[in-house]
C-alpha cells in the first residue's frame, strides 16, 4: 500500500508541475500579446466605404420588394473583379445588414470558399441594405444599396 501512495504522490507532483508550467506559459503568452491591439492603426480598424475594385462588396438585389415577400440578395467581393481565395489572403466573412441591424453573416474558408453568397430575406420596411466583408489583410469593406418596400 505504501508503494501505491508513493506513486500517487509522485503523480500528484507531476500533475502539479504540469499545471504550474501551463500557468507560467499562459502568463508568458499574455505578456507577449499585451499591447498588440495598439499595433492596429485607426485606418486598419475603420471600415472602408470608398470603392476598391478588389475589395468593395457588390450587392445584387431588387430596388423594390413587397412587404413580407422573400427575395434574394447576392453579395460578391470585388466589385471590379473577383477577390482571391488563397491561404495567405482571403475573405473571412460576408455580413448583410438592414440599416444598422445585422441580418446574416457567412464565414468563409480560404481556398475552398469563393467570396460570393446569396441571402434570402424578407423586409417589413425600406431602408439601406449594407454588405460588409473583411479580408485577411485589411479592415472591413462596406457597400450599400437603398431598397424600397411596398405594401
Image (spheres, helix red, strand yellow):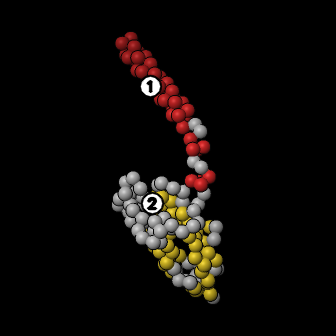
Q: Which sits in the foreground, 139 or 25?
A: 139
Q: Is residue 67 found left or right of 52 in the rendered image?
A: right
Residue at 42% of width from left, 65% of height from top?
Answer: 83
Residue 56 seen in the current view: yes
Q: Position of residue 88 (x, y in %)?
A: 39, 53
Q: Is residue 117 found left or right of 101 in the rendered image?
A: left
Residue at 37% of width from left, 57% of height from top?
Answer: 86
Residue at 60% of width from left, 43% of height from top?
Answer: 38
* SS state under label 1: helix
| Image quarter (top left, top right, bottom left or bottom right) of the N terminus | top left
Q: Which sits in the foreground, 95 or 66?
A: 95
Q: Residue furthest top?
A: 2
Residue at 60% of width from left, 57% of height from top?
Answer: 46
| Image quarter (top left, top right, bottom left or bottom right) of the C terminus | bottom right
Q: Position of residue 25 (x, y in %)?
A: 48, 29
| Precedes in sequence: disc 2 or disc 1 | 1
Q: Which residue is mark 2?
A: 91
Q: Is residue 12 found left or right of 40 in the rendered image?
A: left
Relative to residue 12, is residue 114 depicted above or below?
Answer: below
Q: Which residue is mark 1?
A: 18
Amino acid at each position: 500500500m505504501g508503494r501505491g501512495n508513493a506513486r500517487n504522490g509522485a503523480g500528484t507532483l507531476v500533475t502539479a508541475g504540469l499545471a504550474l508550467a501551463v500557468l507560467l506559459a499562459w502568463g508568458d503568452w499574455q505578456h507577449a500579446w499585451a499591447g498588440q491591439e495598439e499595433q492596429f492603426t485607426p485606418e486598419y480598424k475603420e471600415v472602408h466605404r470608398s470603392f476598391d475594385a478588389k475589395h468593395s462588396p457588390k450587392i445584387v438585389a431588387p430596388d423594390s420588394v413587397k412587404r413580407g415577400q422573400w427575395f434574394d440578395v447576392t453579395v460578391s467581393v470585388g466589385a471590379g473583379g473577383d477577390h482571391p481565395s488563397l491561404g495567405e489572403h482571403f475573405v473571412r466573412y460576408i455580413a448583410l445588414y438592414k440599416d444598422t441591424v445585422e441580418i446574416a453573416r457567412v464565414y468563409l474558408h480560404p481556398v475552398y470558399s469563393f467570396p460570393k453568397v446569396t441571402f434570402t430575406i424578407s423586409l417589413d420596411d425600406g431602408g439601406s441594405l449594407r454588405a460588409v466583408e473583411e479580408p485577411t489583410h485589411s479592415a472591413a469593406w462596406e457597400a450599400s444599396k437603398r431598397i424600397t418596400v411596398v405594401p
